[in-house]
Amino acid sequence: MSLETPINVTKASGEQEPFDESKLRRSLKNAGASELVIDSITHSIKDQLVEGISTRKIYREAFRQLRAESQRVAGRYKLKEAILELGPTGFPFERFVAEILNRVGYKTEVGVTVQGDCVTHEIDVIAVRDDHYYMVECKFHNKKENTCNVHIPLYIQSRFLDVKNNWTRQPGHAGKEHTGYVVTNTRFTQDALTYGECIGLNLLSWDYPKNNGLKDVIGRLNLHPITCLSALTKAEKTLLTDKGIVLTVQLYENKNALKEIGMDQRKANRVIKEAKAICSYHSNNS
């Protein structure tokens, strides 16, 4: 199919934009696909383009072809979808964020009720390292078109200040640094980003800050969610997240995790093999 006349694709939000071959190639490359596979899938997708085709359909077709080539690469390619699968509640995402912080040296607590100056607050994640205390609010969305508008950081900042005012008067907190953080698996609106930058509230989304967003952190640290694994059923993923197992790396660190959910050894070996493959790939573009 000739692309001299641009073909418009329909995003999850309903907006349309011209098909961008470079975006597809970049996402395949970041997942670890070879140039030969990238060329093959890109050409196949271009041959299937029709006006208004959904980006969801393009993703599913690319994933199907990748999975036939390599479960490892396919698992990394579906990262955004895999995080959406951590739902429908926000708790597995909170555990996921906490585990990432644990891996970079923080001590974390999840779902902690703390006293503020005025009222009590339930904090999604409290992370501590040396003299630095983070109050982390996790905003999980199970639809990637959903965003966090400016009302989210406005609300979180007011909660953070209430807690900070109380924390700083506690014994042992003199000279400690207290920081608020909002983490989402989708995106912030521009107003939300502008406000966060203005008042010093840290924001982390799928692709913000640039080159250091959630997708970049996960790729750099190889801390992929278990929902990336094709060998696990939806029910098995739920059983594992209910037990606090949210990272692929935890599956081979905890030898009994799969056995404890009733999985036979033969399948467990297959799951562990896929988990190790996904975690072992290193990319400068992740």
Image (cartoon, grey):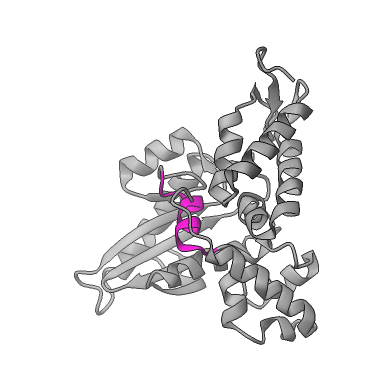
Q: Residue at x 59, y 62 (%)?
A: 93
Q: Residue at x 78, y 77 (%)?
A: 267
Q: Does any portion of residue 86 appear in the rendered image?
A: no
Whether the magenta-drawn stretch holds residue 112 is answered as no
Which of 169/43 is in front? 43
Q: Which region of the structure is painted magenta?
A: 211-223
Which of 155/138 is in front? 138
- Going by the image, does 128 lie left or right of 21? left
Which of 129/281 is in front? 281
- Going by the image, does 129 lie left or right of 238? left
Q: Does any portion of residue 149 appear in the rendered image?
A: yes
Q: Is residue 161 above or below residue 114?
A: above
Whether the magenta-drawn stretch holds residue 220 is answered as yes
Q: Is residue 160 above or below residue 166?
A: above
Residue farthest toward the left in the current orientation of the protein: 175
Residue farthest toward the top in the current orientation of the protein: 5
Residue 208: percent from left, percent from top: 44, 44
Q: Is residue 120 above or below residue 265?
A: above
- Going by the image, does 184 lie left or right of 39? left
Q: Is residue 28 above or below residue 177?
A: above
Task: Decide whether the magenta segment is chiefly helix, strand or loop.
Answer: helix
- Going by the image, does 126 lie left or right of 197? right
Residue 95: percent from left, percent from top: 56, 68
Residue farthest toward the front in the current orientation of the protein: 36
| Quarter of the image where one finds residue 231 | bottom right
Number of callouts = 0
Q: Residue at x 41, y 45 (%)?
A: 211
Which of 181/244 is in front? 244
Quadrant position of the N terminus in the picture: top right
Q: Residue at x 58, y 42 (%)?
A: 35
| Quarter of the image where one finds residue 241 | bottom right
